[in-house]
Image (cartoon, rainbow, N blue to C red):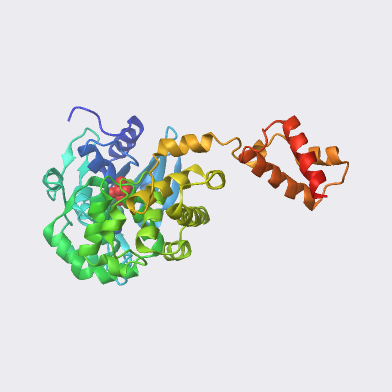
Amino acid sequence: MTALFATESSREVIRLLEQAGYEAVFVGGAVRDYVLGKPAMDIDIATSAKPEQVKAIFPMTVDVGAAHGTVLVLMDGEPIEVTTYRTEGTYSDHRRPDAVQFVTSLREDLLRRDFTMNALAMTKDGELIDLFGGQQDMARQLIRAVGHAADRFSEDALRMFRAVRFAAVLNFDIEEDTFKAIRSHAPQIQHISVERLKAEMDKLFKGSNPVKAFHFIQQTALASHLPLFPENVDKLGQMVPYETAIEGWSCLMVAGDFTPGAVAKAYKLSNAEKSFLLSVQQAYTRRSTELFTLDDLYKFELAVLQVVEKLVHVMGDARQVLSNLDITSMKQALPIQSIADVAVTGKDLMMWTGLRGGRWTGEWMSKITRAVLHGRCDNHPNNIKEWFLDEFKREK
Ligand code: ATP
Ligand code: MG
């Protein structure tokens, strides 16, 4: 391998650990992504040094999980996770090891990792260490558990969902024994916290082939043990690729005929995500019967309008389908995007009428907003003043 793996600072971390007499290598997703020719995200280093020994070598460290062996080293301002070689003890709850034990061999550390592609290691000079055939599996585009698949899923049930998530992200298949083990252990996914499932779902939605994951979820029966999942996966897959995770959640809601509240509750969505789904539901109901009106274009944010237009199209009840570009230019063509764009304020109304402010100011500002939006009045102070005084007199 000619191109140098990882950053200069992370190689420096390994160099210093080696200088102090310890072993240290790159591990995890960054090595996998490098072999796949993808840019490495977070860089993880595994070492034979214990956390205390790591901290003694580097002046700038942060304790992020010393009990589990992880120390964050700040090298030239770059945060690099350094984790002591470890094995995980017994798992009595299908999700967390009862205890971790530090070990001295890299092999033991790699054995505890989930899939062969995630159990690769690389030296600072770019030499690949592949003890479980990870490269071969990657060449065949296969996700294969390290060791005995059934045991590995029984230890930590999240691994089953990681398998389907990686299938979506990498567009890989799941190796046969690994697949069977997921099918026989599917009910154990219920031991996994919703937060961790939600994080995997977000990554799955943004993957290059979410449909593949949806089918795996269904075929392995994981679907019936998840907090909420549509029965009709074909419907769910119709809107791919999703540009954002929230687009995926919107589609899951519509495909499963779930309410925004039900989805938000089942997967503990954030308030922002929940309100996005609420808007999608409202706009979807409107758009199913007619084209977006000026009021819809004004009321809903662009991202909601775009998701809904796409939804209406794939769910097959649209009368006319607009592209994202159409929606964007229709929204941009509105005379105002929000009340803040109106050329006058409540103070102007008070000045023109000589009245003190009150509830009427807000009410009239929304009437003016509507008039401007619908083109009954140009968005200029003089035009608004004329329109307003006319209407105001008439209503008195
Ligand atoms: P991503 O690209 O999403 O970060 P990743 O493989 O780096 O994927 P991480 O959660 O960052 O995933 O974990 C880093 C490494 O730790 C993995 O590559 C794998 O070796 C190991 N790992 C993570 N979660 C598990 C797990 N539940 N069981 C076993 N090994 C795991
Ligand atoms: Mg990672």
Q: Which residue is depicted at the point 30% across and 69% down?
A: 225
**Lateral position of residue 317 relative to residue 300, left or right:** left
Residue 52 visible, this angle: no
Residue at 80% x, 46% y is 394
328 relative to 342 in the view: left or right: left
Residue drawn 22% across and 59% down?
216
Residue 92 in view (yes/no) = yes
- Residues 216 and 69: in front is 216
Q: Is residue 78 above or below residue 367?
A: above
Out of 208 and 192, give the one closest to the viewer. 208
Q: Give the residue at the far front of this rendering.
A: 394
Quadrant (top left/top right/bottom left/bottom right) for the N terminus:
top left
Q: Where is 344 relative to 268, above or below?
A: above
Residue 355 coordinates in the image, percent (x, y): 87, 45
Give the percent coordinates (x, y) of residue 38.
Answer: 26, 37
In the displayed structure, 21 sits above or below 108; it is above
Between 91 and 52, the one lying in front of the other is 91
Count every numbered label the image shows and give the total.
0
Q: Quadrant of residue 298?
A: top right
Q: Is residue 292 above or below residue 386?
A: below
Q: Position of residue 116 (x, y in %)?
A: 18, 51
Residue sitting farthest toward the right: 354
The residue most toward the top is 2
Q: Where does the image place residue 191, in percent across and percent down from the top left?
A: 34, 69
